[in-house]
Amino acid sequence: MENVVLERDGYIAIVKLNREKTLNSLDMETFEELGNVMEQVAKDRSIRIVIVTGTGRAFSSGLDLSVMDRIHEMDSEEFQIWLRYTQERVFNILEDMEKPTIAAINGHAIGGGFELALACDVRISVPDAKFGLPEVNFGLVPDLGGAQRLTRLTNPSIAKELIFSGRIIDANEAYQLRIINKIVEKERLMEEAKKIFENKAPIAISLSKTMINKAIDADNRSGMVYAVQAQTICIKSKDHQEALAAYKEKRPPKFEGK
């Protein structure tokens, strides 16, 4: 792979968009490589945390115009199959994988790049990053889950204003709108991303993520039934016993995800 780089730091996987010359724009090959990497890290039990970031000055400037040329050659059925394939293998895997995902936004996140960040569980950003879904300016709609995820993060009115206008916002406004969780200086970005879920029980985080995702669409009672099942798993885990022992012995716990 050339467009996407996968690095490891212990139990942390770092997925880097690696098209610095095009501000990490997303072409067909990049989508395919991202899908391959997402499938790999989702299945790898030794990975507990996934960080998505970019090389150079941008997180991702969005769709590469070469994609439009190839899409215009497809008929409607071919396009729909490709788009659903891309949604599932990249964006939905990020949202659904049973481990926390963090967007370490090192620069502008526009269009599909913004949608990639929105698919992560947590977003931290450098101060000078810009965000936006400008698809309307090209007679298009956000089609990689951005409209749905932005609506859930903010509210329908804010999502409509940003999407209808195609307006680009800065990191401060994104933070005020609760789109990003934290703003940090660029030299501390990766350090902060790695620390967010450092030394936390993997099973508890995995089950909590599923519970929160289910809460978006399920009623309260159904969510509470799932919580009973999840807690039954946690209470019998070695990680729970290790956490109790560490608390009593006044030392940091050593979680194994068991």
Image: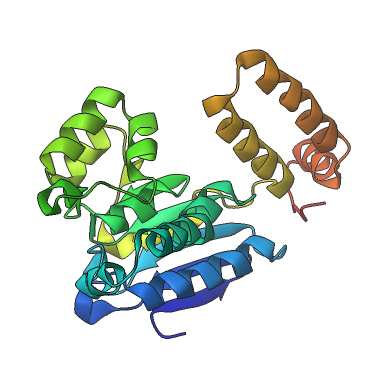
Q: Is residue 111 above or below residue 214?
A: below
Locate residue 59: give its quadrant. bottom left
Q: Residue at x 11, y 38 (%)?
A: 165
Q: Position of residue 72 (x, y in %)?
A: 25, 68
Depth order, front residue of 121/157? 157
- Residue 65 in view in this figure: yes
Q: Is residue 67 above or below residue 134?
A: below
Q: Residue at x 35, y 78 (%)?
A: 18
Q: Residue at x 83, y 51 (%)?
A: 258
Depth order, front residue of 69/238? 69
Q: Position of residue 184 (x, y in %)?
A: 29, 51
Relative to 86, 134 lies left or right: left
Q: Position of residue 120 (x, y in %)?
A: 45, 49
Depth order, front residue of 96/136? 136
Mark count: 0
Q: Position of residue 80 (x, y in %)?
A: 41, 57
